[in-house]
Image (tube, rainbow, N blue to C red):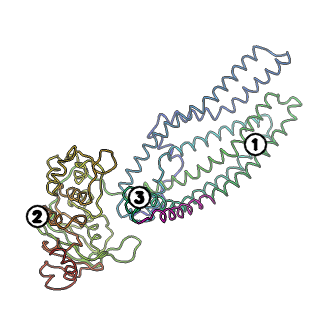
Amino acid sequence: MISIKQKNRKRISLFEYVAFSMQNCCGWTIVYMLLQIISAIFPTLIISVSAAFINAFIENYSKSGNTVQLVRSGGLFLFFVLISYLLPTCISFVGIRLNVNLGTAYDFLLANKRSRIKYALIENSETYELVERVCADSSGRMYKGIRNIFNAAEYIIRFAGITVTLLVYDAAVGLLAGGLLVLIVPICVKGGKEDYKAYEKASEQFRKARYLRTILSGRDSAAERTLFGSANWMNQKWETWHNEGRILAAVATKKNFIRIKIGSMISVLVSGGIMLIMLPDVLNGKISVGLYISIVTAVIGLVQLMTWNIASVVEELVVSRQYIKDYASFMSLEEETQFSEKREKINVSRVEFRDVSFSYPNCDKKVLNHVNFILETGKTYALVGENGSGKSTIVKLMLGLFKDYEGEILINGVELKQFSAWQLQSIYACSFQDFARYELSVRDNIAIGRGIQMDQVSDAAVSEAIDKVGLTNYISAMPKGIETKIGRIEDEGTDLSGGQWQRIAIARALVKDAAVYIMDEPTAALDPMSEKDIYNLIYEAMCGKIGVLITHRLGGAARTDEIIVLKQGKICERGTFKNLMRANGVFAHLYNMQRSWYQ
């Protein structure tokens, strides 16, 4: 397992933003970059243009100038004014297009990567925080990064141009102007680092607040909010978590504001000194009035740039660099092996757990402790026991979701770790207790059980699975049959009851011709009469296969060939229903507590 604290061998730099932008939106990136370059050199060019126009105007006003020269310089000056007006609009337009294209590409990349992260990492809290930092509010992240880079480059070019112009006329003034950059940048860099550290600390509080916001606004929890009157309590909890995050971020912002204001005051004093130093050169004719006015205007603009824009951009660059480090860690997270388009059916005759022990990551307690059992084809097995006894963990290990167990898990005598993810996926068909409710069509909800091959599932196969779970009449009465959208995400969608959703989940497993069927609490949302019918269908589907049933409702376990009883991570009993009842042990005790359900 890769730790997210592991340092990347490749040095991470801000140019990752530029590389991503060039790969996904080359044309708009180049146009945006060219416009930023023009914007950068424009202030330096306009110094000479405006100086020439002012000087020509003064000379013409004193009746010693050239009218033609005034018209020419005036026309050029107006042209530059027009460009200065249009350029920001053009940059904004191109930026919007670039933002949309980059946002789409980046969101797709993050979603794709997130879907491939190894299951074991998903349950790691540190990884979860990293994923939240990278993926939360991801739209615009790449554009914001490249915009900051280009803005920083523009300001450096602009600053260098004006500084060089000052150096030409007075070296001391030019060096004084250069000192502004040396003053401001370290302040901004430190502020940016503190900003991101504060964001890291605040992100956990904001994540919890977002979770509560979902509960407060979600339709699924509306009934309980109304019944229990919990909205006020949740609002207070949300406010507490949100404020804790906000305060952490606000403290850093306050410190940065004070630093920037101090830097701004010094910048204003330095710029005022530049104007006073140059004034004698105007009086003795070393610098023309027009050039002085143009330089003063440029310096004032530069001071405004230095006080807020550059400070903001440098801070954002530091934040962007911290973010790109998180992004690199996120992209380096281990992935599940990609499923292959070509599937070979693997016939499984035996699955064996041999002295298997397991603890979840960052947890010392063994969830499974020296577990041994054998599953053989043509037989059905029930895993039963109290909550936390290890039933679901066994399933996760069988599916290969965790592979850092002790002991051996053998499939046909071959260690499970030797099988690829797509091979394991082809072996098993599962219906989980916490099944997903895909708000898609009925057909897609069921066909997705074939995974990457869902497009190859015929309507006949979908209809057959629907028939097995007893939904044929209900689905046929829907407006579009199996093409009807289910759920509430679309206006024309048809919502289902909890029991109907569970039948759809079971059909999703049954549509797949697998060697091993695993049913985790397949009737939890069903009434007793429906439960009996579903068990009949499940046992029929598992005939000739390896069938594994996980249930707390022990009546369904009575028909299995063998019942495996778990307690605190160990197998405490195993045998047929009759033998376990005769033994009058743990299973018999649990069953007798439910006996009234089946009489």
Q: Is residue 36 left or right of residue 116?
A: right
The magenta span reads: 228-251
Most common SS among magenta residues: helix
Disc 1 to disc 3, how far (Cα)?
46 Å
Residue 581 lies in magenta, yes or no?
Answer: no
- Depth check, front residue: 474 or 182: 474
Residue lying at 23% horizontally and 82% vertically, measured from the top left: 572
How many labels sit on residues? 3
- Above or below — where is 142 with respect to 123? above
Q: Amino acid at mark 3?
A: Leu
Helix, strand or loop at mark 2: loop
Packing grade of label 1 (10 A; few <14, some 14-19, many >=20) is many
Marking on residue 177: 1
Task: Give the x, y percent position of residue 522.
Answer: 22, 64
Residue 558 % position (x, y): 14, 74
Q: Which mark is residue 333?
A: 3
- Judge the density around disc 2: few (<14), some (14-19), many (≥20) Cα neighbours within 10 Å: some
Label 2, on which residue?
A: 543
Q: Quadrant of residue 544?
A: bottom left
Residue at position x 76%, y 31% in the image: 294
Q: Position of residue 491 (x, y in %)?
A: 33, 45
* Quadrant housing the C terminus: bottom left
Residue at (54, 55) in percent of width and height? 322
Q: Amino acid at mark 1?
A: Ala
The image shows residue 16 at horizontal and vertical percentages of 50, 47
Tell me the mark number nearer the camera, choosing from 1 and 2: 2
Quadrant location of residue 286?
top right
Disc 3 to disc 2, C-alpha distance? 40 Å
